[in-house]
Image (cartoon, rainbow, N blue to C red):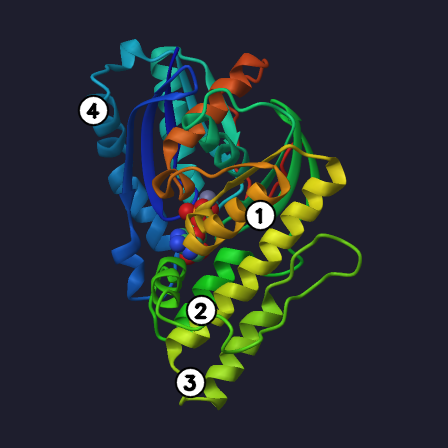
Amino acid sequence: MKVLGIETSCDETSAAVVEDGVRILSNIVASQVELHQKYGGVVPEVASRRHVELILPTIQSALDEASCKLDDIDLIAVINRPGLIGALIVGVSAAKAIAYATGLPLVGVHHLEAHIYANYLVDPDVQFPFICLIVSGGHSDIVWMTGHGRYESLARTRDDAAGEAFDKVARALGLGYPGGPAIDRLAKEGNPSAIAFPRARVGETLDFSFSGIKTAVVRYAAAHPETPIADVAASFQEAVVDVLVENTFAAAAQKGAERVLISGGVAANSLLQSRARQRGTELGIQVAIPPAKLCTDNAAMAASAGYFAYLRGVRDGPDLDTYATEPLGTR
Ligand code: KG4
Ligand code: ZN
């Protein structure tokens, strides 16, 4: 079954063709990073307008690269929640128009579910149950997944998402946008123990809170201009990764999990990857993380999640709507 995936929830216009939810035939990502760089972050209205220009050529490129025509496609899967409404509407409108014109079935996909299913594009035999840490520009969640579409939320962020903290700290340190990759690169030259930034705990929960560390880093950098920025970046990254790994493996211990998956843009972070793998080896827990290009936003992950949703009976129609916020697992 060939699935056309479409993703426009933020600043990437992406279309992909994926076979049986696991084999990528094409995965085109038209990034708008350069467009938003001069503003230091994503400007929603600018993103929407660019999606309008890029969506049809991106879909055509995805079909061409997969050597497909619309006639060869069996299902359309589009991310419809959560995200920037004006951005989501572009992808969802295109998906609905194609579905209407061709008579193909349509499935709306949750963005975080798509991030989780990026793992199926690497290992089609991922076994349930597993713990998944989803860390992106908008979310930091730990979920316990016991079957397709069956989620239990174990933790979320009380304020900023991990990626948001990376982006805000990078901006304050003058490292540009997007901040995650810039901090990841610079931290390799710095001393991660130079500054002991706070590791926030939220009571007895496994929830995250990253706004305090962001403020601490900004204040520290202003008060200590003599400290090399690489040390500040490395110490900040160390503190964030520390909390992400601690809470994820605490969740795994709570559930007796044998498997931990990590996904979302921040999963591309080299320290998070090495720490999580190291901890997994120590504890005898299998750790899976997709390659960087499948961690950040892309439509192949939407096609994969849409395929498995379709198999469990999810169907959408011309009334498919978009949602700025919606928890995972509400349908
Ligand atoms: O999943 P994603 O592409 O978009 C959202 O759904 O938000 O994640 C983007 C986020 C950004 O905040 C970006 O700075 C962060 O992922 N990111 C990273 C790295 N690569 C991307 N954060 C830390 N280290 C990286 N290597
Ligand atoms: Zn994302």
Label 2, label 3: how many angstroms apart (C-alpha)? 12 Å
Tag 4 or tag 2, which sits nearer the N-term?
4
Label 2, label 4: how many angstroms apart (C-alpha)? 39 Å
**Residue indicated by mark 2:** 234
242 in relation to 139, above or below: below
Ligand 1 neighbours mark 1 (CB distance < 8 Å): no
Q: Residue at x 46, y 26 (%)?
A: 120
Q: Element under label 4?
A: helix
Tag 2 or tag 1, which sits nearer the N-term?
2
Q: Element under label 1?
A: helix
**Residue indicated by mark 4:** 65
Tag 1 or tag 4, which sits nearer the N-term?
4
Q: Quadrant of residue 58?
A: top left
Q: Residue at x 59, y 14 (%)?
A: 312
Q: Quadrant of residue 190?
A: bottom left
- Looking at the rendered structure, the kind of residue marked 3 is Thr
Label 3, label 4: how many angstroms apart (C-alpha)? 48 Å
The answer to whether residue 213 shows anywhere in this view is yes
**Residue indicated by mark 1:** 279
Q: Residue 91: x, y in percent?
A: 38, 34
**Residue indicated by mark 3:** 227
Marks 1 and 2: which is nearer the front?
Answer: 1
Q: Element under label 2?
A: helix
User: Is the N terminus in the top left, top right, bottom left or bottom right quadrant?
Assistant: top left
